[in-house]
Structures are given as structure tokens and as C-alpha cells.
């Protein structure tokens, strides 16, 4: 048994333009960081193409068709006010993201691997059912959860999100379903403006931990231990999906939190303990944000190092 990395060169061909933070260099940094000798035992696999039926588990048919029809053959096409931009390689890239997330679910449920990290881009947790947002086109974490339900008969599925930005798209997809749990620790009063303590879902199945700008390891670990982990343990998920953003790293230029590599390692290990208790250790992690190449690389290393420590 082992940790499997799903990735694909097509994810490097999503090119939203010069100076855009969500650049191909992000994925280059992660892949190079995971190809060092320490990670020689990782298994690697090309991400398959997802299907539009999988995408429609979360997204409306009209929105899916809009993305397909707007994908350019040359130049750029904005899906929102300007943050989320398609280039000629973007449609395949986002479908590889969906394919990786769903194949990761299939792999852990078939007991082929212990856990999976999807080293793909662009990120997905802001994407709503009917619109793109915040660099995100399709919400692969939410799609993977519904794929696990549809294809494998699971009911109780959790997504934990430690990106510096709140995953509004995932929360909205889960809000009215008591058998789906969404937990997020994120910077308070920050894009996209959602994620308050009062947003708790139809059955307290949403747990938000908004953290003040400048929060460090001490506050993170205290609030995760008191608020997130007990709620997740009580929910008792059959599968744990992680939205692994590394823009809460203290080096990140867009965020204002002060997390370290050790924090990402610690949080991953704590989540794995709960997955071991109720989900037979089944964890699928999906890359979200992270815009310091150094912080992204070292944070991803710390996260995957924890996944490998069975």
C-alpha cells in the first residue's frame, strides 16, 4: 500500500495570462518538490479525463455547456469579472482535475492505495453550481464527494479545507445535505467574504473557523483541536477529502496567515487519525491554492510526507 500522486502535463497548459497568480509555475514547483529522493516511494499516475456526467453531479447543465462553448481555441476568455480566465489548454486541464479527483476516490475505495494526492490545477473550491469564481472552474472536491456516493454507495463524506480562502462553492454544495460535512479554517474578512461561524448547515454539518489576519500555529492548533476535530469525529465520515491549499503559509504573498510547514504536517496527521477511525484510512487530497512557490513547494512536501507516514 502506498500514496499515489495523480497529475498530468495538461494541467500545465491552463495559462490564464501573464502575471496571473494561478500560473503553471505553481504546479511545476509542487512536482519538483515531490520528485526529490525523500519521496522516491510515491506512486505516480497520469490523471484521466473526467466526464461531463461527473461534472454535472455538482454543476448545472447550462453552466457546463457555457464552459464548453466559451473555451477558446486562441487567446483568452474570462468566465467571471476577470479572475477566472480560460486559455486554449484550460478545458482539458479542468477535466483532468475532475478525472484525478474521481480516480483518486476509486483507487482508495478499491484498496489499491492508502491515500491519494491530486497534484493538479486550477483549484476548484470557489466554483459554484452555476458560475466560476476565484480562479476556479469546476469544484473537483465536491464532485469527488458525489462521485463516491453515486459510484460506490457511500453516504457520509467529509471535505476539510485549509486554504487561506473559504471554499464557498463546496460549502454551498453541501449546506442542505446532512450526510455531507464541510469544515474550513481560513482567514476571516477575506475573499470571498463567506465562512462565518453562523454558517452551520442544515444539521450543523458545516464547521467554519475564521481566523484573524496574522494568526499563527498556536491559534490554528487550538481552534482546530477544540472546534474542527471533535465535529468531524462525531460526523464519522466514510471518506475524507482534503482541499489542500497552501496560501495560509507565512511566505504567501496573497494571504495573511502565518502557518508553517509543521502546521500542514500536523493538521494532515490529525485528519488521518479520524480517517483511520471511521473511513478505513481513506483520504483523497486535492491541491487548491498557494502562491509563494517556495511556500507551496515546502507545504506540499510536509502534507505529502504526512500522507506517506502510515
Image: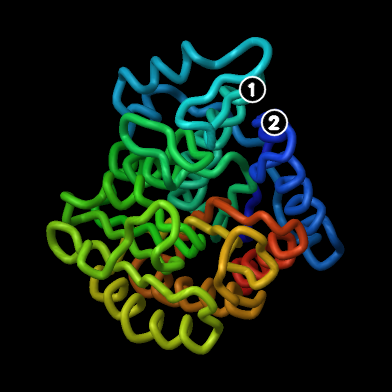
Q: Is residue 140 left or right of residue 13?
A: left
Q: Is residue 230 left or right of residue 26?
A: left
Question: At x 30% / y 52%, what residue is drawn?
Answer: 171
- Give the quarter of the figure containing the C terminus: bottom right
Q: Do residues under tags 1 and 2 come within 8 Å of each other at their CB atoms?
A: yes
Q: How far apart are marks 1 and 2 (CA)?
A: 8 Å
Among the 4 quarters of the image, the one containing residue 6: top right
Among the 4 quarters of the image, the one containing residue 156: bottom left
Disc 1 crowd, CA 10 A, few/some/many (<14, 14-19, 20+): many
Does label 1 or label 2 sit earlier along the sequence? 2
- Give the quarter of the figure containing the N terminus: bottom right
Expressed as whole percent of the image width and height from the top left, the position of residue 133 reads: 44, 38
Examine the rendering and report whether any part of residue 310 can be seen: no
Q: In this view, does 147 lie to the left or right of 174?
A: right
- Per the rendering, the mark at residue 143 is none
Examine the rendering and report whether any part of residue 136 can be seen: yes
Question: At x 81% / y 68%, what residue is drawn?
Answer: 38
Which residue is tagged 2? 17
Amino acid at each position: 500500500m502506498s500514496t499515489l500522486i495523480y497529475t498530468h502535463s495538461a494541467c500545465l497548459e491552463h495559462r490564464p495570462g501573464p502575471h496571473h497568480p494561478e500560473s503553471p509555475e505553481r504546479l511545476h514547483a509542487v512536482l519538483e518538490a515531490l520528485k526529490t529522493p525523500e519521496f522516491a516511494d510515491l506512486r505516480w499516475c497520469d490523471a484521466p479525463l473526467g466526464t461531463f456526467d461527473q461534472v454535472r453531479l455538482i454543476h448545472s447543465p447550462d453552466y457546463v455547456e457555457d464552459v464548453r462553448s466559451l473555451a477558446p481555441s486562441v487567446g483568452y476568455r474570462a468566465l467571471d469579472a476577470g479572475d477566472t480566465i480560460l486559455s486554449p489548454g484550460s478545458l482539458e486541464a479542468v477535466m483532468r482535475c475532475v478525472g484525478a479527483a474521481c480516480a483518486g476516490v476509486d483507487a482508495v475505495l478499491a484498496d489499491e492505495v492508502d491515500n491519494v494526492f491530486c497534484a493538479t490545477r486550477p483549484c476548484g473550491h470557489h466554483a459554484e453550481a452555476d458560475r466560476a469564481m476565484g480562479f476556479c472552474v469546476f469544484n473537483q472536491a465536491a464532485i469527488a464527494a458525489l462521485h463516491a456516493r453515486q459510484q460506490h454507495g457511500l453516504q457520509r463524506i467529509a471535505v476539510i479545507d485549509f486554504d487561506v480562502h473559504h471554499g464557498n462553492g463546496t460549502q454551498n454544495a453541501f449546506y442542505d445535505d446532512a450526510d455531507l460535512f464541510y469544515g474550513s479554517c481560513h482567514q476571516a474578512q477575506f475573499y470571498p467574504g463567506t465562512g462565518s461561524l453562523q454558517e452551520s448547515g442544515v444539521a450543523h454539518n458545516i464547521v467554519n473557523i475564521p481566523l484573524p489576519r496574522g494568526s499563527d500555529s498556536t491559534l490554528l492548533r487550538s481552534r482546530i483541536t477544540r472546534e474542527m476535530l471533535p465535529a468531524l469525529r462525531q460526523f464519522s465520515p466514510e471518506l475524507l477529502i482534503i482541499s489542500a491549499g497552501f496560501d495560509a503559509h507565512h511566505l504567501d504573498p496573497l494571504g495573511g496567515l502565518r502557518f508553517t510547514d509543521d502546521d500542514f504536517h500536523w493538521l494532515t496527521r490529525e485528519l488521518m487519525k479520524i480517517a483511520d477511525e471511521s473511513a478505513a484510512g481513506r483520504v483523497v487530497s486535492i491541491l487548491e491554492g498557494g502562491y509563494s512557490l517556495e511556500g507551496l513547494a515546502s507545504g506540499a512536501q510536509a502534507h505529502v510526507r504526512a500522507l506517506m507516514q502510515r
